[in-house]
Image (tube, rainbow, N blue to C red):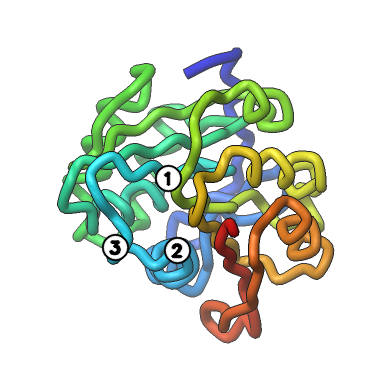
Amino acid sequence: MSEQNQTPQLDWREGGIPVSTRFDDPYFSLAGGLEETRHVFLAGNDLPARLHPGFHIAELGFGTGLNLLALAQIAEMPIRFTSFEAFPMDAAQLSRAHAAFPDELDLLSAELRRGITQPRFTVGQVTAEIVIGDARKTLPNWEGMADAWFLDGFSPAKNPELWNEALLDQVGRHTAPEGSFATYSAAGYIRRALTASGFEVSRAPGYAGKRHMSRGVMR
C-alpha cells in the first residue's frame, strides 16, 4: 500500500450493504453484487477463458474487494491483480461488508482480510496489491501493464474524478496489446474517452435490467 489511508465514512443499508457518504452511492449492486461482478467484470473481459499464468488485472476502485474475490474464485493458475483505491476500508468495515456476501466467498474473504494490511497478499491463486491514493496521481507513476481492467469507481455522476479523460487515457497507456476493459457504465463521454485512448469500444447488455454496459479491446 502507499500514501496515507483515508478510511471512508459509511452508512449501512438493510442487508449489510455499505454506502459511501462522500459519494452517496452503494459499493455494490442492491440486486446482487456477486452476480453483477460476474456479469460486468468477469464476462465483460472474457474471463476466465483468457486467464493464463501471470495474467494481470488492474482495477479502479477496490471498495469491498468483491471483484478480487470473484476473480479468485475462478482463477485456477497464478495471476496478478492491482487495484487503485483512494479511500480503503479498515478491517472492521471490510468484515461487516463481507458478511453480506454469499457463503461461498467466506474462505476467500477471510484470506483477503488477513492479507489486506500487507504490501502484497494472496487470495486463492491471485497475488494482489492495493495502491492507495488518488488514481489521477498514482496511475501515471505505475510501471505495470494490465491485460484487463475493471473500471469500477462510483457512479460517474457522483465521482467524476475517476472517469475523466486524462485518467482514462492513462488506463489506455497502461494496457497491454489486446488487453481489455469492462465497466457497468455506458455513458457516451466515457466510451468516447476510452476510444480515444486506443480501445475498440462496444456496448453490451447491462446487469439486472440496466440497458447497457461498456467493454473494449486495445487495438
Identify the mark at residue 57; answer none if there is no mark.
1
In the structure shown, which secondary structural element does the residue marked by tag 3 occupy?
loop
Against 213, is 87 above or below? above
Q: Which residue is drawn at 55% across and 62% down?
A: 217
Which residue type does callout 1 highlight? Ile
Tags 1 and 2 touching, CB below 8 Å = yes
Which residue type does callout 3 highlight? Pro
Can you give x and y, in whole percent of width and height, for residue 94 in the image?
Answer: 41, 38
Identify the mark at residue 190; answer none if there is no mark.
none
Q: Which residue is drawn at 35% across and 27% down?
A: 116
Give the residue at mark 3. Answer: 48
Q: Which residue is drawn at 57% across and 25% down?
A: 142
- The image quadrant of residue 13 is bottom right
Q: Which residue is drawn at 52% across and 81% down?
A: 208
Total number of numbered labels? 3
Q: Viewed as shown, does residue 143 lie left or right of 201?
A: left
Q: Viewed as shown, does residue 199 lie left or right of 208?
A: right
Q: Which of 44 and 1 is in front in this view?
A: 44
Give the residue at mark 2. Answer: 45
Q: Distance between the residues labelled 1 and 2?
A: 10 Å
In the structure shown, which secondary structural element does the residue marked by tag 2 occupy?
helix
Can you give x and y, in whole percent of width and height, for residue 25 in the image?
Answer: 67, 55
**Quadrant where the image shows the C terminus:** bottom right
Can you give x and y, in whole percent of width and height, for residue 135 in the image?
Answer: 66, 32
Tags 1 and 3 touching, CB below 8 Å = no
Q: Nearer the viewer, residue 100 or 147?
A: 147
Against 190, is 205 above or below? below
Q: How far apart are marks 2 and 3 (CA)?
A: 8 Å
Sequence-first tag of 1 and 3? 3
Tags 2 and 3 touching, CB below 8 Å = no
